[in-house]
Amino acid sequence: MLVIPGAKYVELCISCLSVPDSALPRLTDTKAVEAFVDSADVVVIGFLEGEESHGYQELVSAAKQVDSVPVALCTAKEVWADYALSSDTITLFRKADNHQENLVIATVKKLEADGLVNFITINEVRYITEYNQVTAVGLFNSEVKTHLLLFASRGGKEYTELKERLGALAPDFTGKFLFVLINGAEKSNSRSLGYFGLKSGDLPRVGLYEGDSDMKWLLPPGEISTERVREFCQSFLRGELKVSYGCGLPKGNHDLA
């Protein structure tokens, strides 16, 4: 078992992210947990009594299947209270909306590795999350109801650059927007494009969607720079964006300044 006290966690952080064949990294105090949570967009911690606890082996198995998400174990019950936990719980932490998603073991009728994989992937909302049928659940269950949408076609010359650019901007709007990537080359996303009056040939574009009001806005055509997108977001927060069309499908391709 790899034991990581808080004082030594930071320098060991990188090496602890890989999951050994038979064990998860162990976090022994609150500082270690805080550092682990801060180490990636999304992490999972099993707050369990030990390796013999119900759910531990299932968590190890799930961790191997979802290797993009760091997973660790915390058996120190004095730490559990800091996260409002009182019994064995598998918890997903994510930075994009400062959310803690708890799966209380005692409430699960049948705990299996595949179920934990599903729990992780559904709630794996990152600073920029690619939209699909699985991630849609976590995105729309989030308390953050406003989405900054990047419509871009995978394989396009700007795709990776724009994804990285907006992903770097997303932390500045934590708790205000979820940044979502919609792959315009995916046929299943044609309805999302159509809702904004877009076709794949119009991409890349940037839009805003407010879930509570079902309202939408498009950033006018032009360079998708960090500065323009930042100002687009700030304009929304200041209440300065004009509404082109309220609810339902758009009547045309409306750009909002």
Image (tube, rainbow, N blue to C red):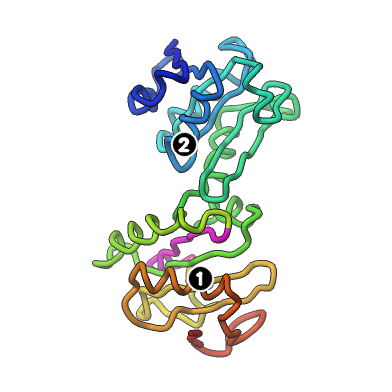
Residue type at mark 2: give it. Asp
- Determine crowd level at label 1: few under 14, some 14-19, many 20+ residues with C-alpha closer than 10 A: some
Q: Residue at x 57, y 46 (%)?
A: 98
Residue type at mark 1: give it. Gln
Q: Nearer the viewer, mark 1 or mark 2?
A: 1
Residue 161 location (% of width, % of height):
28, 61
The mark total stands at 2
Q: Residue at x 59, y 38 (%)?
A: 119
- Determine crowd level at label 2: few under 14, some 14-19, many 20+ residues with C-alpha closer than 10 A: some
Residue 154 location (% of width, % of height):
33, 63
In the rendered image, residue 215 lying in the magenta stretch gets the answer no
Tag 2 residue: 38
Depth check: give the residue in front, 133 or 18.
18
In the rendered image, residue 182 lying in the magenta stretch gets the answer yes
| Residue with the most extreme left position | 157
Residue 36 location (% of width, % of height):
47, 30
Whether 236 is drawn above or below 3: the answer is below
Whether 84 is drawn above or below 201: the answer is above
Whether 93 is drawn above or below 174: the answer is above
Q: Secondary structure at mark 1?
A: helix
Quarter of the image with the N terminus is top left
Tell me the quarter of the picture where residue 245 sits: bottom right
Q: Secondary structure at mark 2?
A: loop
Mark 1 to mark 2: distance in Å? 26 Å
Residues shaded magenta: 176-188
Residue 159 location (% of width, % of height):
31, 64
Q: Residue at x 42, y 70 (%)?
A: 229
Tag 1 residue: 234
